[in-house]
Amino acid sequence: MWTPIRTADGSWTLRDETLGQACHSLSGAWEQARLRYAGPCRVRELGLERGVVRLLDIGTGLGLNLAAALAALDGTGARLEAVTFERDAEVLSRARELADWPAEVEAWLRSAHEALGGEARVGVSIRLVVGDAREQLPAIDELPFDAVFLDPFSPQVAPELWSEAFLAEIARRMTPQAVLSTYSASFAVRLSLARAGLVVGRGPRVGAKAEGTLASREWALPPLEGRLQRRLERRRGSS
Ligand SMILES: C[S@@+](CC[C@H](N)C(=O)[O-])C[C@H]1O[C@@H](n2cnc3c(N)ncnc32)[C@H](O)[C@@H]1O
């Protein structure tokens, strides 16, 4: 069961009442989608450089992160090719029922939902995979990806999507320059990303959240604080 909540920037999020967790920070769902995901993953820059952006989106939710990716590509002429995973398709139906979005968000969200619904659209292809991402990801053959939005529920309520094995499965599908972004700054998550062969960096502050995490094989990221980096290095090789 999903309950709508209006966030501080006027955009909506939905709360999963079974888990007691909202899909976004209440300080601004659209802000989070743009500043936590589309921006740090360099969606616009990739579009301008390559003309196509292949995106792996974990946790489709309302589709806001996908909408932010489309907004970031506005005017670039680049194509978005995304694969997105969602366990509960009802969240998308509930998102479609929500009215009175800020105008800018509504337009991009509508485009994302049309593509998610399989409508043919110039410059966009979004494949929705419904089911548990852990089981479904190994079966997909679109690879590698230029960017990864890792946006599951928190490790406390959905530990399966933060496991070392699942993160390694994602890392294996990233180009050397691809950037993964997530809101979690937990040491355990960072360690799993490092053990998956990625270099871990600091994600931006967004809203009320102090910092998130970025990870890439080769793209230069804002470094972690020195002591934290050394601790990560020490722990990376040990079990
Ligand atoms: C934080 S919300 C994602 C918000 C979304 N990125 C957006 O832009 O609106 C997390 C989503 O992950 C989904 N989810 C939870 N466990 C999952 C699993 N094992 N596999 C796939 N999706 C899952 C939830 O149903 C929820 O919609």
Image (cartoon, rainbow, N blue to C red):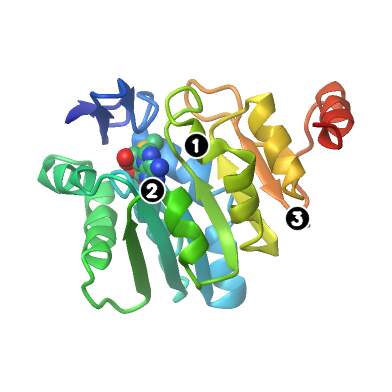
Real-space Cα distance between discs 2 and 1?
Answer: 10 Å
Q: Amino acid at mark 3?
A: Arg
Real-space Cα distance between discs 2 and 3?
Answer: 26 Å
Left/right of residue 236 with respect to residue 163 in the rendered view: right
Q: What residue would you read off at disc 3?
A: 217
Q: What residue would you read off at disc 1?
A: 160
Of badges 2 and 3, nearer the viewer stands: 2
Where residue 166 sits: x, y (%)? 57, 47
Q: Secondary structure at mark 2?
A: loop
Give the number of the disc on residue 133: none
Where residue 8 sits: x, y (%)? 31, 25
Looking at the picture, does residue 221 appear above or below residue 113?
above
Q: Amino acid at mark 1?
A: Glu
> Which quadrant of the rendered structure holds the N terminus?
top left
- In the rendered image, which quarter is residue 188 located in? top right
Left/right of residue 10 with respect to residue 151 in the rendered view: left
Q: Is residue 30 visible?
A: no
- Which circle's residue, 1 or 3, is located before the other in the chain? 1
Q: Residues within 10 Å of mark 1 (few under 14, many from 20)?
A: some
> Any atom of ligand 1 within 8 Å of the CB at mark 2?
yes
